[in-house]
């Protein structure tokens, strides 16, 4: 089974060779993924910017296994709107009181077109709407993922 959604060509370059109109969303996504690629060698963005793939994302202490693939789907209104969650490789567990448990907010079937590819949806809500398009980015979102996974449940 492929760990990446099929049918799309990936690149982590900040620009395309294809002629296209560069929107604010495209420019931001390309710049931010190029920056993130310096820290995540297996980072790819779909040619149509429908998602960002980070392979082998190191999980905080307590997760089993200790690495997972991550898919981030930037909303159509990005960067004005934040992603509302992300996808993680399936079959992850957390250590809790000497046992391995399935983490909360980790759903196979909810909001998940990638379930058959081995991903589960992980809800990362921002109920207080703290996202600020001028300050936040995929970079701060990835930091929030790491922080949240280190403190969740």
Image (cartoon, rainbow, N blue to C red):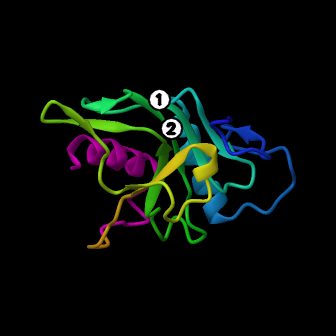
Mark 1 nearby-residue class (10 Å; few <14, some 14–19, many ≥20): few
Q: Is residue 34 found left or right of 135 in the rendered image? A: right
Residue pointed to by mark 1: 39
Q: Is residue 96 found left or right of 141 in the rendered image? A: left
Relative vertical location of residue 52 with respect to residue 44 in this rendering, above or below: below
Residue 148 highlighted magenta (yes or no)? yes
On-image quarter of the N terminus: top right
- What are the residue bounds of the magenta stretch? 130-153
> What secondary structure is found at the residue carrying circle 1?
loop
Q: In which quarter of the image is residue 61?
A: top left
Q: Residue 20, percent across and down?
A: 83, 59
Relative vertical location of residue 114 with respect to residue 134 in this rendering, above or below: above
For the point 54% across and 66% down, the residue is 78
Residue pointed to by mark 2: 36
Q: Is residue 61 found left or right of 17 in the rendered image? A: left
Q: Nearer the viewer, residue 4 or 98?
A: 98
Q: Do the residues labelled 1 and 2 touch (CB within 8 Å)?
A: yes
Relative vertical location of residue 35 with respect to residue 39 in this rendering, above or below: below
Q: Residue 106, percent across and down?
A: 38, 53
Q: How far apart are marks 1 and 2 (CA)?
A: 6 Å
- The residue sitting at the right extreme is 19
Q: Is residue 36 found left or right of 6 in the rendered image? A: left
Mark 2 nearby-residue class (10 Å; few <14, some 14–19, many ≥20): some
Q: Nearer the viewer, residue 144 or 107?
A: 107
């Amino acid at each position: 089974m492929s760990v990446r959604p099929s049918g799309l060509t990936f690149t982590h370059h900040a620009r395309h060779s294809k002629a296209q109109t560069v929107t604010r969303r495209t420019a931001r996504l390309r710049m931010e993924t190029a920056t993130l690629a310096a820290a995540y060698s297996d980072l790819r963005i779909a040619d149509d910017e429908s998602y960002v793939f980070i392979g082998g994302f190191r999980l905080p202490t307590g997760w089993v296994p200790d690495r997972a693939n991550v898919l981030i789907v930037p909303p159509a209104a990005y960067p004005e709107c934040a992603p509302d969650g992300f996808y993680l490789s399936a079959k992850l567990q957390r250590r809790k009181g000497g046992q391995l448990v399935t983490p909360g907010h980790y759903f196979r079937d909810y909001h998940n077109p990638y379930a058959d590819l081995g991903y589960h949806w992980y809800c990362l809500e921002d109920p207080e709407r703290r996202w600020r398009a001028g300050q936040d980015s995929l970079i701060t979102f990835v930091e929030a993922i790491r922080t949240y996974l280190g403190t969740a449940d």
